[in-house]
Image (cartoon, helix red, strand yellow):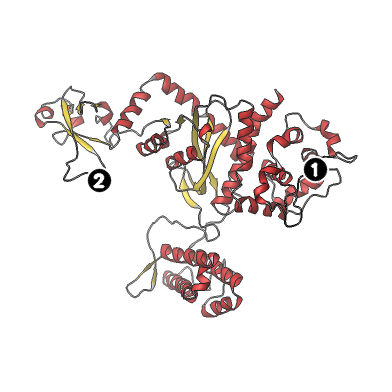
Amino acid sequence: MLAGRERQQGFFDAAWCSGLLAEDSIYALLANHGDRIVRDEDFAECYSARWGRPSIAPSLLAKVLLLAYRNGLSDRRAMEALRFDLRWKVALDLPIDHPGFHHTSLVKFRARLLLHGKERIVFERSLELAAELGLLDGAVEQIVDSTPMLGAAAVQDTVTLVRAGVRKLIDAVTARDASAAARLRAALAFDYARPREKPAADWQDKTAREAMLVEVATDAQRAVRAVEHDHELVADAAVGGAVKLLREIVGQEFDTGDDQAPRPRHGRQSRQIISAHDPEMRHGRKTSARRFTGYKLHAAAAADAPLVTAITISPGNEHDGHHAAGLVSQQPERRRPQRLIGDAAYGNIEVREQLEQRQVGVLARLHTTASDADDAIAKDEFHIDLDTDTVTCPQGKTATIYKPRRSRPAATGQRVARFSPTDCQPCPLRARCAPGGRRQIRLSRREDLRQAALRQLADPAERERLKRTRPRIERLLGLMVYRYHARTSRYHGTRKTELQAVWTAVLVNLHPIRAALQA
Ligand code: SF4
């Protein structure tokens, strides 16, 4: 049952020591304006109105969680700080002798937020407060970018991955039906009490190693077969999920021969599932030279105020640009930007088209069309006129843009302009432009968007705006990952990782809010 907070001040209240706090600290901010940042009534949907014991006030737990993320403390350490650190007691308006709470209170609080879809409530409140303080007035542009968030789980090799998958299935069946779990264990060849321990084999010998890999995969298939015939058992969400995961792991790590026996896959291949404990994290790249394992944190920030306005998490192998539309859509209509500013990952036609559907413009570099040959004449050196359906080359020759034939529509919607061989063959630029004899220019399905972007980027004022504004988000992402410890996820899974990212973004938003409240 939802319980609010007693507001009467007692003789032992730490509030008497509030003068000791630094004025610009988060402790002073929570002590003086905490009720404007976190309110009990915002969490009302997470608690029963009539039943159960009175809860710990959710605003209190929310502030503890904020301070835990701010200081990079585990749940246990956060509760120790609440018990012994006077600053925490002043910030949370508690008496000096308050013993704190059990650390699992935070685990249950987060679970409650996730269960009721309220993990963004404090983030949204921070933006409402920023709007009330006039920090978002006239915000028509937002900047988008992403940064890696490393996964909390270890990358597992094939044997450990498959064995951990089998153990997950055993645990899920045990939780549902102990006797079915006993039958499952009896059907298996290996013991899964310690799934990280590999079965005894000569792992240095290739033949013995491959034979053991086949044994491990066969045992996993045995586990799936032992469970899948029991429809009632598989209907359980945890058991069904564990069966699906184990099937995916075996399918990813092994080929199946004609005799249906598993065979280890050879050669380089990108693995999708890299940990049975966190099956959603992926290997990813931030640049061609910078690899990481885990998630990507995608964020949008106001262009003219240091405020994070939208945030989401994806597996580490997903493209930045695919999340731009989602960052816009998660914001209420009144806060949506008219234009997004980003790097080249947000400049491709697909992203521009998705944002066009949401009436949002884009200011971002386009991927270059330069060919591999350094001195080759690129497509962008041709003048494309979509009103007259013509393309003019650097030598002033013109070719007509052909539309796809009705009988054979091109799946990609691409159109082509072919220059005449009589123009190209005598041309002095032929070696650089049309080594094959005649030049052909391909136009994308949305060449209009591409041409509009090129005209925009040809404007020096727009280029200057892009150059000066886009890096501002990097400071906010830097605050999140370095100062507030969001470089590494604390939890397994996308949703819990997103909860951490969102609450860390609140800490970033509190910087300008504090400055505005003190002004
Ligand atoms: S090779 Fe053909 S298309 Fe290229 S510049 Fe010369 S005339 Fe124009």
Q: Nearer the viewer, mark 2 or mark 1?
A: 2
Looking at the image, which residue sits at the far front? 50
Residue 1 place in picture, x, y as percent: 73, 53
Disc 2 residue type (three-letter): Ala
Q: Looking at the picture, does residue 214 appear above or below residue 59?
A: below
Mark number displayed over residue 85:
1
| Left or right position of 474 against 8 | left
Looking at the image, which residue sits at the far left? 422
Viewer can see residue 325: yes
Question: Badge 1, how many Cα within 10 Å: few under 14, some, many 20+?
Answer: few
Q: Looking at the picture, does residue 374 appear above or below residue 394?
A: below
Q: Secondary structure at mark 1?
A: loop
Residue that mark 2 sits on = 411
First of labels 2, 1 by sequence position: 1
Nearest the eye: 349 or 426: 349
Looking at the image, which residue sits at the far right? 11
